[in-house]
Amino acid sequence: MRPLRLLHLCLLLGCLGLLACPPYGGDDDDAGDDDDAGDDDDAVGDDDDSTEVESIQLLGEVVARSAESGGILSVEEYQARSGLMVVYLLEDPTDLASVLWKVTLTGPDTFVGVLDPNLGPVYAVVVADCDANTIIEDVDIRRDYPFNPLIGGVSDLSGVTLEIDIPENCRGGGGGGGPDTSPTTTISGPLTLINLPDAPIAVAAADEDLEHVGWWRFYEPGSADYSITVRDWLGLAAVIAYHESDGNGLFEPSDYVGAATSNPIQLGIGDVTGVEIVIPSADPLDFPTPAQPIELAGNVAYSNYAGGDILIFASGSGMGGQLLGATTVAAPGPFTIEVPDNFFGMTLWAVADPEADGAYNLATDASDSLGPFNTDGDQTGLALTLEDVPTTVGSVSGTITLNVPAGANDTLRVFLNEQGGSDPPEFLVFGNPGSTISYSFLAVEPGSYLVSAFLDYDSDAVGGPADDEPDTGSDIFVVTPATDVTGVDFSVP
């Protein structure tokens, strides 16, 4: 299991030199030999010695993972699954329409941004155009930086790593069920831009409350008219439009948006013509956007607490997987942590940090975990109870050399098998494993063991390896109380 490092950001006020103060009533720039003599040096714009605070840099990286295995996707593997992605810096994490800064990426990559100083709390978010339809909408995938908010002060913001999980079928496809032959209504009319340059336009139909959007149609810059056909079962339709304002190849909530002046429109009574869409609309529109984080709330207990912090994390694919959320509490008691909604296979876990320095060791520090479980809206009443690591147990660690290629959707499953034991073996899962994998099993009771492993193609195993999946194991070894058994190394196959 890979230990997860808690990220520390040093954001504000490095070393400031001590400045000598002028005498009461005086001005240090009023000396006769000063180049500002005769100027009003208390006015910044008139002071040759004054310096404005420079812009700050945002430096970070987006890591894309397979939603099935947790393995890291290459740029090519990501592009086979999803469309463009956007990194947003937001003042309000609930508002994708008001963006402080953003960058559009074709796949996982590093990014650099130049920001105004003294921004205060800001929130880093990454959104992938999952279905690659060039629309940032509610079906797309959003992941927030686990250590939000960042403090945009006067120091650069670095080491901001955003991880986003992309399913293999993110682009959709398939279909089935035969063609939809239900009645339709065609709505058409002029496209009117108010003080906006020509740009690509995306027109869609939605229900009256703008909660469900579909039937997208795309128009080239300069198009004067539109036409869209909608299924009558919608009842009442609202026709809406995006203006691709920033030229990044995506239609987003931060672009200019508009609506038909005659919304809502009754369907099923014949085609409707002359329905004008005005961009921007006089009234703001609240289009559906990718799901915001939800809250997990509960209580963390630790009967042997003697000081320090308690670190609480949410991650995918076990405690060593994709980091989804993090928070720190000063003592046992209530906690709240923000995590993605509709996430499958989340683990919630906590570990004691007696030194309150952000560092921990799962082999020695008290911990507890819940999961894996799926998220579907806010959850309360979650209980974590930290238990000290018994002094009678040991640990097992080693490396596994993988001599066969593994893809992004493959996993290496590693098992700790007790000789003669009746309980199911403890196991670890490594997504998209490299050629060398380091593993460790903690809190191992005394006994005789062997470690086995196999490569699970497509991460679909329900038990042991299939006939074509390579597997092997170590020699038998003995774990004694309070002993760390190291160097249990072997190769697959």
Image: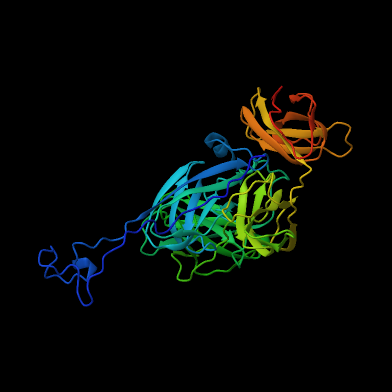
Which residue appears farthest toward the bottom when viewing the image? 25
Measured as percent of width and height from the top left, residue 103 is found at 44, 49
In which quadrant will I find the C terminus? top right
Q: Residue at 59% of width from left, 38% of height from top? A: 72
What is the count of numbered marks?
0
Measured as percent of width and height from the top left, residue 138 is found at 60, 56
In which quadrant will I find the N terminus? top right
Q: Is residue 237 left or right of residue 469?
A: left
- The colouring scheme, among rainbow, by chain, secondary structure or one colour, is rainbow
Q: Is residue 436 left or right of residue 285?
A: right
Measured as percent of width and height from the top left, residue 111 is found at 44, 45
Quick check: can you spot residue 145?
yes
Residue 388, above or below 471? below
Measured as percent of width and height from the top left, residue 414 is found at 74, 33
Q: Nearer the viewer, residue 116 or 449?
A: 449
Q: Nearer the viewer, residue 365 or 38?
A: 365
The image quarter containing residue 488 is top right
Q: Is residue 108 left or right of residue 17?
A: right
Q: Nearer the viewer, residue 234 or 3?
A: 3
Residue 87, above or below 462? below
Q: Is residue 393 left or right of residue 487?
A: right
Q: Residue at 32% of width from left, 59% of height from top? A: 17
Residue 475, above or below 170? above
The image quarter containing residue 432 is top right
